[in-house]
Image (spheres, helix red, strand yellow):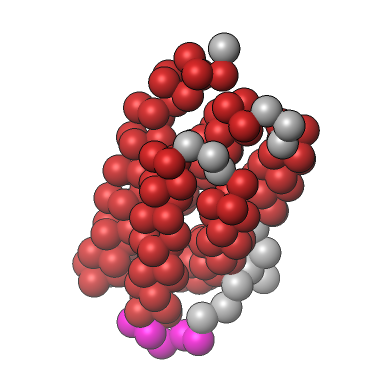
Amino acid sequence: MSMKTLNDKLAHDLGDIYDAEHRFLEAQQQMHEMANARELKAMIKEHIAQTEQQINNLEQAYELVGMKPKRVKCDAAAGLVIEGEKSMKEAKDNPAVLDVVIAGAAAKVEHYEIASYRGLIAACEQMGQQELCNIFEQNLAQEEETAQKVESSLPMMLKKAA
């Protein structure tokens, strides 16, 4: 896809995060199955529901710009998922270490999503697309909240794994 205008970039970035959210949803489902700590499982389960809502929000954003939802392959998301899967396989024999790996992978994903939504919001503000900003701000708020929860739980998981 050639990007010649800010609208082209917005369409690309929307497709990119739409693909990323789908990839991350599948990865979260796998993480949920592999997680051991009750708190981590609950956190992942909650974020699965949020991710499903975020995908719906992105579909609303597509409607607002008069486009059909289209996934644009997100190489960064694909890489984060592959890295997380590899690490989980390597840690599968130690439940406490596996939980740390899962939480660390989740934190990386959250920060990618936060950066993506901040970029979309900045572009929409520049373009005067306040309705789109509102949608992206809802998703951003959930991602920031999840990142904070994951990061605050890491020290206890690290201590347990040590």
Figure quadrant of the C terminus: top right
Q: Residue 90 falls in which quadrant of the image?
A: top right
Q: Which residues are magenta?
A: 63-68
Q: In the image, 153: left or right of 126?
A: right
Answer whether residue 70 is visible to the viewer in this image.
Answer: yes
Figure quadrant of the N terminus: bottom right
Q: How many dots with numbers?
A: 0
For image coordinates 52% across by 67% down, the residue present is 18
For image coordinates 39% across by 75% down, the residue present is 56
For image coordinates 27% across by 59% down, the residue present is 138
Residue 157 versus residue 125 in the image, above or below: above
Residue 72 versus residue 85 in the image, above or below: below
Between 74 and 142, the one lying in front of the other is 142
Tell me residue 109's x, y (percent): 53, 44
For image coordinates 56% across by 58% down, the residue present is 29
Q: In the image, 103: left or right of 27?
A: left
Tell me residue 9's x, y (percent): 52, 63
Residue 130 versus residue 59 in the image, above or below: above
Q: In the image, 139: left or right of 161?
A: left
Answer whether residue 128 is visible to the viewer in this image.
Answer: no
Magenta-span inclusion, residue 128: no
Residue 116 versus residue 132 in the image, above or below: above
Between 37 and 4, the one lying in front of the other is 37
Between 36 and 107, the one lying in front of the other is 36
Tell me residue 116's x, y (percent): 46, 51
Magenta-span inclusion, residue 66: yes
Tell me residue 28's x, y (percent): 54, 54
Majority secondary structure of magenta residues: loop
Between 87 and 69, the one lying in front of the other is 87
